Amino acid sequence: MTDTNSSRTARLIHARRDGLNKGDPVALPIVPSATFHLPGDPAGVAQYGRSHNPTWEAVEHALSLLEDAPCLAFPSGMAAITAPFMALLKAGDRILLPSDGYYTTRLLADRILARLGVTAETRPTAQFADGGFDGFRIVYIETPSNPGLDILDIKAVSDAAHAAGALVIADNTTMTPLGQRPLALGADIVVAADTKAVNGHSDVLYGHVASRDEAVMSAVSEWRKLSGSIPGPFESWLVHRGLETLELRFARMCDSAEAVAKALKGHAALETLRYPGLPDHPAHHLAAAQMDRFGFLLGLTLRSEAAAEHFIDNCPLIQPATSFGGIHTSAERRARWGDAVAPGFVRLAVGCEPTEELVSALVQTLDNLPAGL
Ligand SMILES: *Cc1c(COP(=O)(O)O)cnc(C)c1O
């Protein structure tokens, strides 16, 4: 089989088959065991629940088929992001973060890493390569940025960062391995919040680290075992179930997002609409070259905070919520969290509703915004 998203997904769906004995359950069992039967020499088998668990190992195997790289599972996206920092950094190191990326990562650097002697600098995603990467131990990227949807060239940034002696970590949460493959473009490590589209049902927090660098993975694995930052078996089972339908859901979400972008573009109630799949996005050509899909997030700017809140509250197919990647389309005004965006800016996260129903609900809600908002 050639190595495409389709072949990777097909392998994932049949991933359990090879290990089954006659009479074994086809569905993944949940194994909530802290201890394992361990007489005599403990080498080579499951020993204890902080280092081994068959349910999370099944998730790691499934994810590794999509990432085309070994994966380690974590109990949240932030636990996955924290792991390579704690495993690889030492006092005196400098790291570069996107100023417009996931806020909690910058907070982690400010509140925790700074105390340990690690200095973080920030740059906007659209100007990330400006100024070079000399002196950084880790160059951390997030493309498209969230919620601004700016895009950087993963290959160019990785090449320049490597020439300067840095490791590149990519937070690929918004795209999933089916939408963008940072490791194939030169990044050393992928981190992701599987809380979002990978689990896809808004009922669990989860994360993973993927890398083809053995030294990195053994340091991250040691961090997990010693710090105890391990996922639970039930959460792992939910994520495994979500993974089996990721390809179906992600395709619907991205197809619908493209349809929504085309239908809403130029609507009189919108000051701007940003989506990497539209030709007027400033980095559309780069997006088309490095992403397999254009994603399911859109940035809409309505005229005022009141107009944005009315749109979010009155569209029957929008769930007002933070986060994204669930079955339902959701939206929020990002200024409520202090993001540097206009008061009327809405991040719309497209879900799995039938496309035409969703497009017409969104258009009608915009058409019927009360005059004067
Ligand atoms: C949600 C998110 C995270 C954090 O994931 P949690 O599971 O909430 O810890 C990190 N990065 C991005 C881009 C996210 O969207």
Image: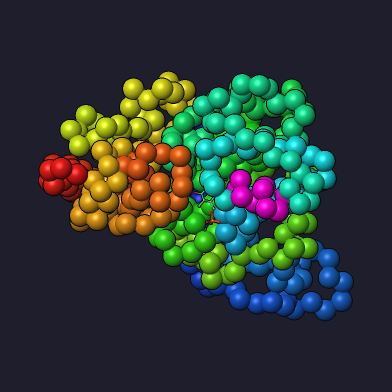
Residue situated furthest right in the rendering: 41
Please state which of residues 363 and 205 is positioned toward the viewer in this rendering. Answer: 363
Q: How many marks?
A: 0
| Residue at screen point 68% across, 22% down | 132
| Residue at screen point 25% across, 38% down | 303
Q: Is residue 190 magenta?
A: no
Say above or below: 372 vs 236: above
Lateral position of residue 30 relative to residue 69, left or right:
left
Please state which of residues 271 and 129 is positioned toward the viewer in this rendering. Answer: 271
Which quadrant holds the C terminus? top left
Where residue 308 appears, x then y in whole percent?
27, 46
Please state which of residues 269 and 74 is positioned toward the viewer in this rendering. Answer: 269
Where residue 172 appears, x then y in whole percent?
54, 42
On the image, which quarter does residue 186 sit in? top right
Where residue 368 appears, x then y in whole percent?
12, 46
Q: Which residues are magenta?
A: 105-113
